[in-house]
Image (cartoon, rainbow, N blue to C red):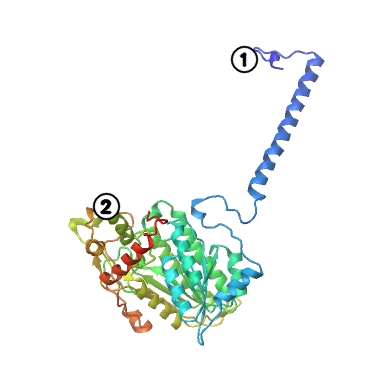
Amino acid sequence: MLKHIPSTPGKFKMEKSPYILNKSRWHWHSSIMKLTFWSFIFLGLIFIFFFRSPSSNPIPQDPSRRSLRTHNWGGPAWEKRVRSSARIRSRNGISVLVTGAAGFVGIHVSTALKRRGDGVLGLDNFNDYYDPSLKRARQALLDRTGVFVVEGDINDSTLLKKLFEVVPFTHVMHLAAQAGVRYAMENPSSYVHSNIAGLVSLLEACKSANPQPAIVWASSSSVYGLNSKVPFSEKDRTDQPASLYAATKKAGEEIAHTYNHIYGLSLTALRFFTVYGPWGRPDMAYFFFTRDILKGKTISIFEAANHGTVARDFTYIDDIVKGCLAALDTAEKSTGSGGKKKGPAQFRVYNLGNTSPVPVSDLVSILERLLKVDAKRNVIKLPQNGDVRFTHANISLAQRELGYKPSTDLQTGMKKFVRWYLSYYSGGNKAAG
């Protein structure tokens, strides 16, 4: 066949012979048949690769949806574990679905609820924003206390519907979220996926449930953004977010108000202020400062313009847990039924902080004393990537309506954290990052 093609383009002249014409047509039809055959083979391989896999296999890895992996759930044994974990064991107990149960706040809230006899079922997707082995260790601890953590995503509407069919939850403690300020610059879509789409998915499940649960969820002090009035009060403006994380939390508050207004869902937003303590998040400054000081690495400490102080209203985890439980205990019932509002429903927003901002440089000094190691400090300018100069909570509303009274100072709280850190990472089989 190649002998009929000239070496010089433009000088090929088709012969008029019928034999040649018929042979050319045969080759043309043969090529089309081969192309069609291999096209079907290629499409078949695509079909097998993408659609034949069982549901337990991961969904293709889009970073913004990396947490939306399907997991094996369902069946009589699974439902029995779900019911057992959510069973109320105290006289006036409540049944709570805790999302983000294998997270930092999630493990502490779940444990506290279980200890007092409430029914608790956890839900967590165990994503890899930080070391999943720490989340698995939290899960193991919860399992020993009788809390079953379902592995799944809040965007999985089928799973959420099933959970509400199996258990008539009285309350939802929604703690699942994409956390962190700086990471939003690397993976912005993950914040929209978890903090906005995920919240809507959960609220959709709650408004359709019968009975509708009361919902308490974690907002953030980040919503105050560039607000310069201190201390931050719930009535202050929150329309100047300094990070995408803050913007998604603010959007969450507006979405929550919408579902409260339209569907009668009882909703309480808790604005957490720099929570710290044992089982904390490795992306938090106090956590990686501890790690790097012990490793002899230089730590970067931010300062504001003109050598201004950067300070945070550090709040110990036990105080946050007390605020969460108080919010659950004072939450009124939702008023909707079958997805329809029957009357006005409770809507609340509270600051949960410590009311005592501490300069970050002082935090480092506390760690130096507790670790008995001098830190190698590198003072740098506060970057314009979402971090704010200070946070300071006005907690008078939470004190008045929830009886919220934080009692742990930073020195005491960090002592407890360091004790946990040294114990947890001394096993040799765990890495601090």
Instruction: Name the residue at the bottom extreme.
Output: 91
**Residue at the spot of label 1:** 9
Residue 351 on image: x %, y %: 35, 74
Of the pair 253 and 162, the residue shown nearer to us: 162
Distance from Cα at disc 2 to Cα at disc 1:
71 Å
**Residue at the spot of label 2:** 296
Residue 232 on image: x %, y %: 30, 71
Q: Is residue 264 above or below residue 385?
A: below
* Residue at x 73%, y 27% (from the top left corner): 31
Does residue 115 appear in this view?
yes
Q: Which of marks 2 and 1 is nearer the N terminus?
A: 1
Does residue 274 appear in this view?
no
Of the pair 311 and 189, the residue shown nearer to us: 311
The circle drawn on residue 144 is: none
Tell me the amino acid under the disc marked 1.
Pro
Q: In which quarter of the image is residue 30?
A: top right
Judged left or right of residue 117, residue 163 is: right
